[in-house]
Amino acid sequence: MAAKALEQIATGCSIPDTRTKLICTRGRAPYTATPEILQLVELAQEEGKALGLSIVAEGKGGLSDANLLMEAGIPVLDSLGPIGGGMHDLNREYLRVDTIPVRGALLAGLISQLCLSKSTG
């Protein structure tokens, strides 16, 4: 439906001495939990447990930059930042400031574990 509407717009160009070309691309691949990503989940869960957090891996649909990294073969986790809600709605979006320190500690611990595992094998 959207593709047909875009095609109509492209073919309906009426500006003299110009042309319109519509190029369709595949877009981002869906986020898929690879074995390497599942290892990252386990590390995040261990770090979370030490902070009193229960980290649960779940698919949410939607897109993020994590999809691009995952497609490039780079293991990546998404949604580890501060807690909030109402995403992409300027009238409803919010951030729980009280979650910043503990989520920062989670990320710092995860980065530390990743660095240690890389340096020690």
Image (cartoon, rainbow, N blue to C red):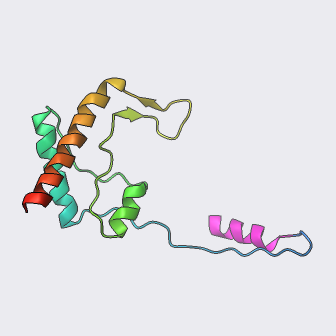
The answer to whether residue 43 is above or below residue 120 is above
The residue range painted magenta reads 1-13
The answer to whether residue 119 is above or below residue 83 is below
Residue 10's quadrant in the figure?
bottom right
Q: Describe residue 39's horizontal placement relative to residue 58 as left or right.
A: left
| Percent x, y of residue 14 | 89, 69
The number of discs equals 0
Viewer-nearest residue: 103 or 84: 103
Viewer-nearest residue: 97 or 7: 97
Q: Describe residue 21's horizontal placement relative to residue 78 as left or right.
A: right
Residue 72's quadrant in the figure?
bottom left
Q: Quadrant of the N terminus?
A: bottom right
Identify the residue at horizontal 33%, vertical 40% (top origin). Answer: 81
Residue 19 on the magenta span: no
Q: Main secondary structure of the magenta part?
A: helix
Identify the residue at horizontal 14%, vertical 60% (top origin). Answer: 118
| Percent x, y of residue 109 | 17, 42
| Percent x, y of residue 84 | 38, 33
| Percent x, y of residue 121 | 7, 63
